[in-house]
Amino acid sequence: MAEPLVVEAHEGEQVAPELRPLLIRVYDLLEGPSTDLGVLKRALADLLTFLESSRGRTNANCWATDLFFGLQDGWDRDWDHLPDAFCDILSDMGGALHDTVSAPAIAADVDSTPEKLLARVQALRV
């Protein structure tokens, strides 16, 4: 089993220790076509709720999450077997989420702030 990379810092700012288990939980749920979409939806909601919190909404945490889903370094799975709505959210988490703190207007314009992503997750039908 591969060990996916979760960066520990960005530009000298440490990633919160709570982030790694949230990311790995989503990753673990992506294994195979039998993914329980309800459980995955809850894991995504937990991750994004953390990222929108005062503790979680840091440049380092948003960058680490973006890199995790964008680069998929060390991954041995993908999300191609999921419904398109899930794929779109996961792809967007690896797109402009890193702009959330440093360039919030950019992240907001492409619906990639934690709040906008969380609203999309909450709207998913499973």
Image (cartoon, rainbow, N blue to C red):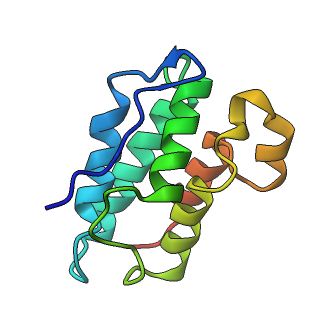
Q: Quadrant of the N terminus?
A: bottom left
Number of numbered discs on residues: 0
Q: Position of residue 105 (x, y in %)?
A: 86, 39
The quarter of the picture where residue 70 lies is bottom right
Rendering coords of residue 100 (x, y %): 70, 36
Q: Residue at x 33, y 22 (%)?
A: 17
Compared to residue 88, the image places residue 33 above or below, namely below
Is the residue 121 above or below the residue 85 in the image?
Answer: above
Residue nearest the observer in this picture, 82 or 16: 16
Q: Quarter of the image containing the C terminus?
A: bottom left
User: Residue 55: in sight, yes or no?
Assistant: yes
* Residue shown at the point (55%, 15%) measured from the top left: 12
Residue 22 placement, left or right of 2: right
The one of 71 and 110 positioned closer to us in this rendering: 71
Q: Position of residue 57 (x, y in %)?
A: 58, 25
Is 74 on the left-hand or right-hand side of 64?
left
Q: Is residue 74 left or right of residue 53?
A: left
Q: Residue at x 76, y 45 (%)?
A: 107
User: What is the quadrant of residue 22 in the picture?
Assistant: top left
Taking depth in this image into account, of 2 and 81 the one nearest to the observer is 2
